[in-house]
Amino acid sequence: MKEIDIKQTIDMQKTFFSSGKTLDIDFRINALKKLKTCINNYENDITEAILKDLGKSHFESYMCEIGLVLSEISYMLKHIRSCAREKRVHTPLSQFHSRSFKKPSPYGTVLIMSPWNYPFLLTLDPLVDAIAAGNTAVIKPSAYSPHTSQIIYDIIEKCFDRQFISVITGGREENTFLLNQRFDYIFFTGSQSVGKEVMRHAADNLIPVTLELGGKSPCIVEKSANLKLAAKRIVFGKFLNCGQTCVAPDYIYCDAAVKKKLLAEIKKQISLQFGAAPLQNINYGRIINDKHFKRICGLMEPSKIIHGGQTDEAALRIEPTVMDNISFSDNVMKEEIFGPLLPILTYDSLDQAIHKINSMPHPLALYIFTSDKHAARKVTAQCGFGGGCINDTVIHLATSQLGFGGFGESGMGSYHGKDGFSTFSHYKSIVDKKTWLDLPMRYQPYKEIYEKLVRVFLR
């Protein structure tokens, strides 16, 4: 889309927002219902598009993308009126003849920039929250997943007028132009490097942002863990979408005493879940493009591979691969893997593991497998991370009742459910002062008796 067309679209949205139509809760509800119907009608087209971009099976696309978007819409339809209601708060004694409340209000015209790894989910999920909160939105999906971007464009064009919701396709040129516009809010999901650029542009125009980034999410396996179940759930979470998941376990950090048994169980689970020849498994996806394929291959050290390691460059496929004898100085531990490589590291004490994790950038997720409730409480209390699971992986992402997001290097802000509504809302703090009484103590000339009364009220 040409720059002049993008600018006109943004101006139209600002004008539409100024009309006040999106303030009507029924308008928002109707918009969400329309979107839900359209997604259901386009389900086969969506799954085909995701298959073309990432090789995901129809089942995985529904379970991890379409179904989660529909779940978010259902949550908002059920809770939108309570989320949008004014919230009364306590009024201090000095203002006893007043009513104090918080009023949620939409920001205005928001920009949603989404990534390629879950191209449908991570575009439509924040859009659902933005619509529920009463905003207009410009969506910029990733150029790396063109088929899904196109179906998103088709759905939005079918559902909404461009002055309400619009999709801008394209690459870096369009991204840069959009970031130089004066949006009222920016919601970005993607890499840390691009997130920094988004924040720099937002700072120039003092635009508030939510950044959903990533990081090296650890998976602690404590010595009391059920190793068979731990391996099963780790393999699922790690190799889902070929490891191209922002909350995938980036590496295993296990007690040295259980490493041998854990590795044996992980190898079994890879074979059970993906077969003896994963590269021939039609339900196992692929790496998004040649650039990322080569980057991931560059992190593989043949001497440290103990399972997998086979690749198919023509199909952009890499086997689920396990690497042992890894240290934190190895290349695979110097960046977020974002692919089907699973390094194994060990610790001698849980305190050592906690100290090491806290010395690194805050991860978006953390997982601990343990049968020791004290160990679970200790790790979740003392480690800094966005969110996670005890005795499972990635599933915390799948509930609208839990806010999702990181902090520090893994991002800022959160969304999903009530948190998503709050993210796209500004809460106005308002005091409704009654007129039937006007205490004189705050007005000049000040008197000694007034000062005594003020001290009583404000203690």
Image (cartoon, grey):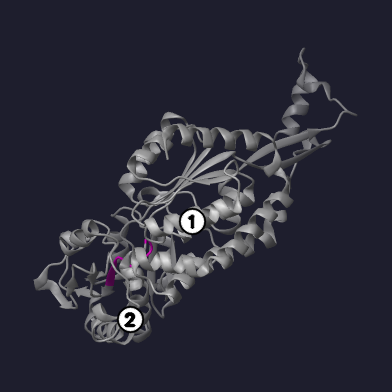
What type is the residue that disc 2 sits on?
Ala
Q: Earlier in the sequence, mark 1 or mark 2?
A: 1
Quadrant of residue 338 in the image? Answer: bottom left
Q: Which label sits on residue 446?
A: none
Left or right, 324 with respect to 15, comes to left
Is the C-beta separation of discs 1 and 2 under 8 Å? no
Q: Which label sits on residue 231?
A: 2
Using a 10 Å C-alpha cutoff, classify the residue at mark 2 as few (fewer than 14 neighbours), some (14 to 19) or many (20 or more).
many
Q: Residue at x 64, y 46 (%)?
A: 134
Question: Residue 242, how many percent across, how many down?
Answer: 31, 69
Quadrant of residue 305 in the image? Answer: bottom left
Q: Verify whether residue 206 appears in magenta.
A: no
Q: Residue at x 31, y 84 (%)?
A: 269
Q: Residue at x 38, y 41 (%)?
A: 175
Quadrant of residue 260 in the image? Answer: bottom left
Q: Secondary structure at mark 1?
A: helix
Which residue, given by chain and number where applicable, does mark 1 sit on?
Answer: 152
In front: mark 1 or mark 2? 1
What type is the residue that disc 1 sits on?
Ile
Q: Nearer the viewer, residue 364 or 244?
A: 244
**Quadrant showing the N terminus:** top left
**Quadrant showing the C terminus:** top right
Q: Nearer the viewer, residue 139 or 340?
A: 139
Question: Residue 8, how many percent across, how many down?
Answer: 52, 33
Left or right, 304 with respect to 140, comes to left
Q: Nearer the viewer, residue 193 or 109?
A: 109
Q: Is residue 231 above or below residue 452?
A: below
> Which residues lie in the magenta part?
246-253
Q: Main secondary structure of the magenta part?
A: loop
Question: Residue 12, how many percent across, how many down?
Answer: 58, 35
